[in-house]
Image: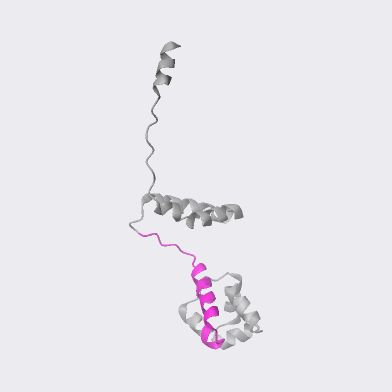
Amino acid sequence: MTLRELRTMKRLRQSEVAELLGYEQTYISALEIGIKGPPPEVFLERVVRALDLDESWKNRLREAHDASQRRIVIPADAPESVFWMVNELRQQIDRLHPAQIELIRAALNFTQAITVEPVPIGRLRRRASDKSRKGKN
């Protein structure tokens, strides 16, 4: 999406961008509609140079590139629960409701609760009056 925004902001057609960057127009189109995965680094560098992007646009382009990664690499030393969670996500990812996506994103950003040590809960003690009542009944 960012490439399309950038192209329209610069008032360029896909064919013009393709020519500037040295790529086919079909490749530019495929990137814009999401058929192709993230482009190589050299593509990003060419976009930055050819369109003379400022720092803000460079950052937006980088963020869009990072977000468009299609593969997730799970560290080999990750807990088993991570593998199971990622597998469940993989199986359901194309059927997630927008509310589920928001909940997952909120959970990922919920770091405050993770950094606080849990407070141990002690056993509840009965008062003497409770014991005496049981014995009278």
Please tell me which residue is depicted at 64% across the width and 81% down the height of the picture.
Answer: 9
In-front residue for pair 57/112: 112
Please tell me which residue is depicted at 62% across the width and 81% down the height of the picture.
Answer: 7
Q: Give how far across and how far down residue 65 sits, in percent.
A: 51, 72
Residue 83 appears in the picture as rendered: no
Establish if 97 lies above or below 2: above
Where does the N terminus fall, quadrant-wise?
Answer: bottom right
Q: In the displayed structure, does residue 43 sit left or right of residue 121? A: right
Q: How many marks?
A: 0
Find out whether residue 68 is within the magenta segment. Answer: yes
Q: How are the residues colored?
A: one colour
Establish if 28 lies above or below 127: below
In-front residue for pair 24/112: 112
Establish if 3 lies above or below 111: below
Residue situated furthest front in the rendering: 129
Please tell me which residue is depicted at 62% across the width and 86% down the height of the picture.
Answer: 16
Establish if 76 lies above or below 20: above
Q: In the displayed structure, does residue 9 sit left or right of residue 133? A: right
Where does the C terminus fall, quadrant-wise?
Answer: top left
Q: Quadrant of residue 73?
A: bottom left
Q: Quadrant of residue 125?
A: top left
Residue 2 appears in the picture as rendered: yes
Residues rendered magenta in the picture: 48-75
Q: In the displayed structure, does residue 103 sit left or right of residue 71? A: right
Q: Give how far across and how far down residue 58 sits, in percent.
A: 52, 79
Please tell me which residue is depicted at 46% across the width and 64% down the height of the picture.
Answer: 71
Residue situated furthest top in the rendering: 136
Q: Give how far across and how far down residue 85 sits, in percent.
A: 45, 51
Q: Give how far across and how far down residue 106 sits, in percent.
A: 52, 55
Find out whether residue 56 is within the magenta segment. Answer: yes
